[in-house]
Image (cartoon, grey):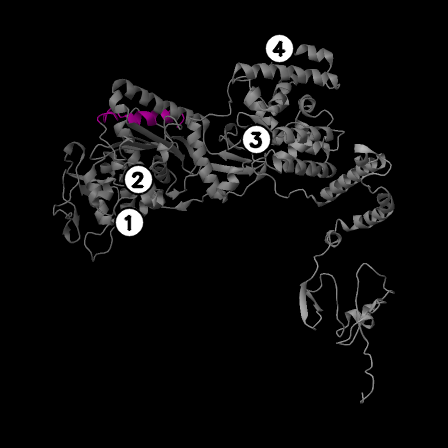
Amino acid sequence: MGDGEEPQERDVTMQLKMPGSFTTDETVQLRVPPPGTSGPESEEAISGISASEVDSPTSKRIRGGDTADQTKRDGNGNRNRRKAPRPSLGSRLAAVPRLAPLLGPLAELTARLAPYARRMRPQYPRPGRTDWRRWLPSWRQWLGGSLAGVGFTGLFLVVAYAATDIPDNLNSYATQQDNVYFWADGTPMARTGWVQRQAMPLKDIPEDVRWAVLAAENASFYSDPGISFSGITRALLRTVGQGDTQGGSTITQQYVKNVYLNQDQTISRKFTEAMIALKLDNQMSKDDILEAYLNTSWFGRGTYGIQRAAQAYYGKDVSELNASEAAFLASLLKGAGLYDPTLNSANRERAVERWSWTLDRMVEIGKLSKAEREKYKEFPEPLKSNPLYDTGEQSDYLVELASQYAKSAADISDKDFDLGGYQIYTTFDKKREAQLTDSVTKARKKALEEDPKTAKTAHYGAASVAADGRILAVYGGPDHRKQGYNESNASTVPAGSAFMPFVYAAGLEHGVRKTRDEERTPVTGDSLYNGDDDVPVTTPEGPYWDRSGRKVSASNDGDVDYGQISLHQALALSVNTPFMQLGMDTGLEEVRATAEASGLLPSSIGAQVPALTQGSSTPSAIRMASGYSTFAAAGEHTEPYSVRKLTHNGTKVVLKLPDARRAVGADVAEEVTSALTDSFRTAHPDGAPADAEVAGKAGTTEDDTAAWYVGTYNSVSTAVVVYRMDLAKSLEPLPLKGIAGTTDDSVPYGIWSGATSPLG
């Protein structure tokens, strides 16, 4: 450009892409004047946009929401930044896939109604009117407003319906079931759980029961859309007026509330409930919804579901209910706390009225004949208490053992197990359990009559374990509600001389060593040991000294001297001193290892000092019975277990049952059993038939704090322990003071005998 020449106008165009406003053939051209120019010449017309130019790298794209900021220049050429406009409601709704198809028709409807809306636009004050009437809307305005309200309400409901999802996660508490325990013979033993529920297929629920519930709660269930518009309106009005929501729920809505939502009484919860109910009604069959509802509803007395309600109130399965009983159970859905007639007279009055109304309603809707209605004149009185609860019984101790084992053996978390639905098939023998419980109960009663003060702090633990590890029976205590811990599984008192068989087995298995350098030499039942009282214990280096500087020695019951005695005879006569020395010759490590291999828990084994051979270990009754059963099983030990099969709602659950493993040699087990057989026959020559396979031994402690009897009868080992302990003061065992009887009249043996004979 030379001197004197007029500056040529530079024409700069900027292509703008306007989504949704133009077709692909329409363009808008924005002409931007050179810097410094102003006036009319700087105002350019918009006349087109090229889509290709807009998207080219050299072009400036200006798109609503595409850039974080847009700029403009002020009069001095400075750039002022301004925030990009927020996306419109239309663009945000278009981003929701399920709503996109609705926006086109909606836009068309809006365009059609726009002229009418402009025509009906209010003018205030209205021309041609006087006084206050100038301010009243015309009928056209009233009509337009009403139609608009209906339209927007409908639009809101359509959008809400489309945007509502049925939750994937059910309310776990609402679908929780109880766990059912069975005896070894397959008969029911107990039911437990935070709630009592057992799901029942609809086909197993009689029609009279179904229609009693429908008549009382939702007679139009099979024809309604899942919600009641009039009921919802009443509930909402009640919420606005009084702050709560009541009534107005169909069975579908109640089911949604039970399994998907909470019990909050709010408008938002009620609205969400209605939306989910509508959608659920379109996705599930009516029968499926009814079945789910009947299995998840609360009926009081700790029960969920119609099956458990039938058992709790009438002691029968739901399949055995008649229409009259079903009508009463249906009344409980209004609130069990208000309609359980056993709670108070007002409840009974309400229950009778509701029961009668339900039966009449069944006749009214054609689901019960008038003739049959005439048969139900008397109110069907329910049971006074729930028979499913047996707290305090021995079964509570059995359930405790079985549940712990099931969770461990099947690797089930406490949380999953508590959700219920498990069927636990235990190893407990119903007859043996009854006989063991009866035997202990008689002994306890006798002690309380003879010496109530001493017997008040007496404790009795007992257990029977088969040679293959099955726990057949236990006695855990007098009342689980008062004494929660299980006596049969408690490691509280020493085994005393009942521990001798494990010392004997260790010596027979490993041999002995008198001096440190010599090889081990085998011992047999004929090997002789000094059986005199207070014989000092020796080691390869000489006498064994305790920390106080005194020689350690064992003492026989009654301070009797037996002289040289064979190990077999020493066990048969329960002579203590030979076994303390045998333990030292064998090695206390080997004694400990043999006891653990035979079934005693490592945590219960006593300190590795000479007193270990005298029964300083504190095994439970279950573990002592398990240890003796190892000898009855030819030296193979199987860990005691209480569950033989586990299913979840009928589907088998993998259960890791224990395998037998070798603890001691078969010849060792045979010799120990032989000595224990002689021990039993010597002490109780008339205690069992001559041809019975029976072996056993008493156990006493030096400080008279525990008395045992452990014996095996026909491959079932039973251990019984009696001791005293004042749990209110300490866990220290107290002297028995004769509560366990005498050698000739031993209470533990009496319990053992009563529990095993004639079962064996």
**Mark 3 neighbour class, 10 Å CA radius: few under 14, some 14 to 19, many 20 or more:** many
Q: Report the Cα–Cα distance between label 2 and label 3.
A: 50 Å
Q: Report the Cα–Cα distance between label 2 and label 4.
A: 69 Å
Query: Percent position (x, y) of residue 307?
Result: 60, 27
Residue at the image point whose x is 35% and y is 39% from the top:
627
The three-letter amino acid code for the residue at tag 4 is: Glu
Q: Which residue is mark 1?
A: 590
Q: Which residue is mark 2?
A: 672
- Element type at mark 1: helix
- Element type at mark 4: loop
Query: Percent position (x, y) of residue 538?
Result: 16, 48
Q: Which residue is mark 4?
A: 378
Q: Image quadrant for the C terminus? A: top left
Left or right position of 301 against 4: left
Left or right position of 285 against 477: right
Tag 1 or tag 3, which sits nearer the N-term? 3
Asked if the stretch drawn in magenta spans residue 743, the answer is yes
Q: Report the Cα–Cα distance between label 3 and label 1.
A: 52 Å
